[in-house]
Image (cartoon, rainbow, N blue to C red):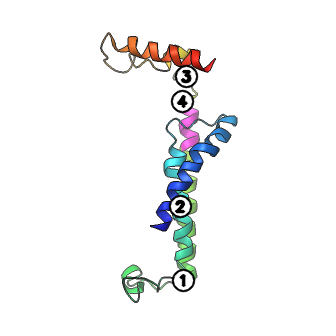
Amino acid sequence: MIVGSIAGALSTVGFRFIKPVLQKFRIHDSCGVSNLHGLPGLLAGIFGIILAIFPTYSLYTENLLGTCWNTYHRTYWGQFGYQAAALGVTIGIAVIGGLITGAILRLPLLNDPRPSAYYNDRAHWDVPDDFYQDVTTVTHVEHHALA
């Protein structure tokens, strides 16, 4: 419960302070995925690495070795290494996947520079005729509020 509370606070701090820094580097995180999933996941991975050193301590049983490492002959430090490697591989896959996705989305075929196209789903979906009237009004009001 403590780790979850820290993860929630870290996610909130990420939205407030880290997202503006990412935007300065032109890193686009449309839904705050890095703050909502990335930072808490990184924290959980770090705690997993640290807690791998202490597998015999638990509030529920005297020894977790038989449950967690059944038939595996790993030392505490060996498990520490496996946890660290898993976190490293996970971060690597996330970064490489994000770079590939970003490169694909920057292709001229998929990148429309007109701001009016940002909220236009008509090319990809069947939408009602009156749908864009409301969206255009909201976008117009938000644009003038920001200027």
Q: Nearer the viewer, mark 2 or mark 1?
A: 2
Find residue 134 and report its horizontal and vertical position in percent. Answer: 39, 14
- At x 49%, y 17%, the residue is 139
Q: Secondary structure at mark 3?
A: loop
Disc 2 target residue: 6
Q: Which residue: 59% across, 41% down?
A: 99
Residue placed farthest to the bottom in the image? Answer: 62
Q: What secondary structure characterizes most of the magenta part? A: helix
Instruction: Please tell me how crowded label 1 is: few (under 14), some (14-19), or many (20+) other residues with Cα within 10 Å.
Output: some
Question: Is residue 11 in the magenta section?
Answer: no
Asked whether residue 145 is in view, the answer is yes
Determine which residue is flagged by label 3.
111
Spatial distance from mark 3 to mark 2, Cα to Cα?
A: 38 Å
Range of residues picked out in magenta: 98-104
SS of the residue under disc 2: helix
**N-terminal of the two: label 4 or label 2?**
2
Q: Residue at x 52, y 41 (%)?
A: 32
Residue 39 as seen in the image, left or right of residue 125: right
Q: Amino acid at mark 2?
A: Ile
Q: Which residue is mark 1?
A: 76
The residue type indicated by label 1 comes to Tyr
Question: 10 Å neighbourhood of mark 4: few (<14), some, or many (≥20)?
Answer: few
Q: Earlier in the sequence, mark 4 or mark 1?
A: 1
* Residue 113 seen from this side: no
Mark 3–mark 1 distance (CA, rounded to whole Å): 50 Å
- Residue 105's label in the rendered image is 4
The amino acid at mark 4 is: Leu
| Circle 3 residues within 10 Å: few <14, some 14–19, many ≥20 | few
